[in-house]
């Protein structure tokens, strides 16, 4: 509808749109490789559909014309004359066929001439010379729209489920939460600064200021500036195999009191860590102690369940 075009100047000048676009946690690196363009036309959807339809039609016509030509030229001589056409069409129709398509009047029809006049050939003629497997046949509605077989291959379904689980595990664990639920009530809450994925510690633009808290269920929550709502960063269960550590940062870093949370690997694939900064050493150490305490509780609970 042209909304993007009308907002383009503001989006490029104000900056919050691009900041929100790239602030996608572990997916930020991927988004940095994705071209982001402003389309000036209002009808790009229609244009794309039209272009694709024309491409598909052109491809189908090219394929049909080539197959029919080869049917009339089984010896692959590269041309069709009256004698060979008569075997499929009869002599009278063969003469009409060659006369209609023989553009240079040399008595034969090569493929370029055949392709150029292909669209003008009557369907009855094409039906007569199409390969047998391409001729139109009558089929029932049930045959036309027969449902595909689903859920009958246990091995295939197991493989698919494994792929889905692996994909979901690699994605950010962030998910929206209901702040009105009792389980999401903060036990404690402070301001932390999250470093963008592959961000520069010395750049203030790469540190995102957010409210973070631990809820009653032991999950780490934050208020997303992108989605403008509370989100779950990770649950207590996610901390079981996570690495929680202090980060030694160089003097040029905007923040000096930094710690890192590295989630467990998924299917042997490393998941990008997240670096947080507190405004004081005491604030950083408090967060680390709380996370480690929750991690210990989660490990103990997991051990009891395994036993």
Image (cartoon, grey):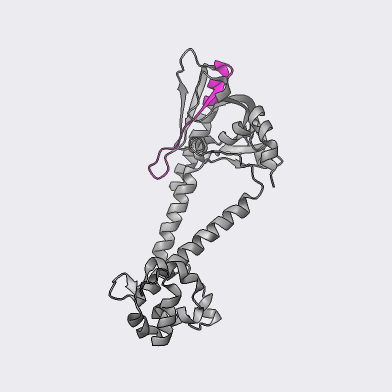
Residue at 55% x, 80% y is 141
Count of numbered labels shown in the rendering: 0
267 up-or-down from 154: above or below: above
Confirm whether residue 54 shows in the render.
yes
| Residue range (magenta) | 265-288
On the image, the x and y values in percent for residue 61 come to 47, 67
Residue at 44% x, 62% y is 157
283 on left or right of 1: left
113 up-or-down from 174: above or below: below
Residue at 66% x, 35% y is 8
On the image, the x and y values in percent for residue 66 come to 39, 69
- Which sits in the foreground, 24 or 115? 115
On the image, the x and y values in percent for residue 144 come to 52, 77
Residue at 53% x, 60% y is 54
269 up-or-down from 197: above or below: below
On the image, the x and y values in percent for residue 114 come to 41, 70
Residue 277 covered by magenta stretch: yes
Q: In the image as oriented, which residue stretches furthest toward the top?
A: 251
Residue 188 covered by magenta stretch: no
Confirm whether residue 219 shows in the render.
no
Q: Quadrant of residue 22?
A: top right
54 on left or right of 106: right
């Amino acid at each position: 509808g042209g909304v993007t075009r009308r907002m383009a100047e503001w989006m490029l000048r104000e900056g919050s749109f691009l900041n929100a676009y790239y602030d996608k946690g572990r997916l930020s690196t991927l988004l940095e490789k994705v071209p982001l363009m402003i389309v000036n036309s209002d009808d790009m959807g229609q244009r794309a559909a039209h272009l694709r339809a024309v491409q598909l039609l052109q491809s189908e016509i090219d394929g049909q014309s080539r197959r029919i030509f080869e049917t009339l030229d089984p010896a692959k001589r590269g041309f069709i004359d009256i004698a060979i056409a008569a075997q499929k069409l009869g002599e009278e129709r063969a003469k009409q066929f060659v006369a209609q398509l023989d553009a240079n009047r040399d008595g034969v029809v090569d493929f370029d001439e055949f392709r150029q006049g292909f669209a003008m050939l009557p369907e009855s003629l094409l039906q007569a010379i199409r390969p047998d497997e391409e001729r139109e046949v009558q089929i029932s509605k049930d045959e036309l729209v027969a449902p595909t077989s689903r859920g009958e291959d246990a091995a295939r379904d197991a493989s698919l489920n494994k792929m889905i689980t692996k994909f979901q595990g690699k994605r950010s664990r962030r998910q929206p939460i209901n702040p009105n639920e009792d389980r999401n009530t903060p036990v404690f809450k402070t301001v932390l600064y999250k470093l963008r994925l592959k961000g520069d510690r010395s750049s203030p633009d790469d540190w995102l200021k957010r409210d973070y808290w631990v809820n009653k269920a032991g999950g780490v929550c934050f208020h997303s500036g992108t989605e403008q709502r509370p989100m779950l960063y990770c649950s207590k269960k996610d901390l079981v195999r996570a690495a929680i550590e202090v980060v030694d940062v160089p003097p040029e870093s905007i923040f000096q009191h930094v710690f890192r949370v590295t989630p467990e690997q998924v299917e042997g694939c490393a998941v990008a860590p997240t670096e947080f900064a507190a405004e004081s050493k005491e604030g950083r150490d408090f967060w680390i102690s709380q996370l480690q305490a929750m991690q210990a509780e989660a490990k103990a609970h997991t051990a009891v369940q395994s036993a």
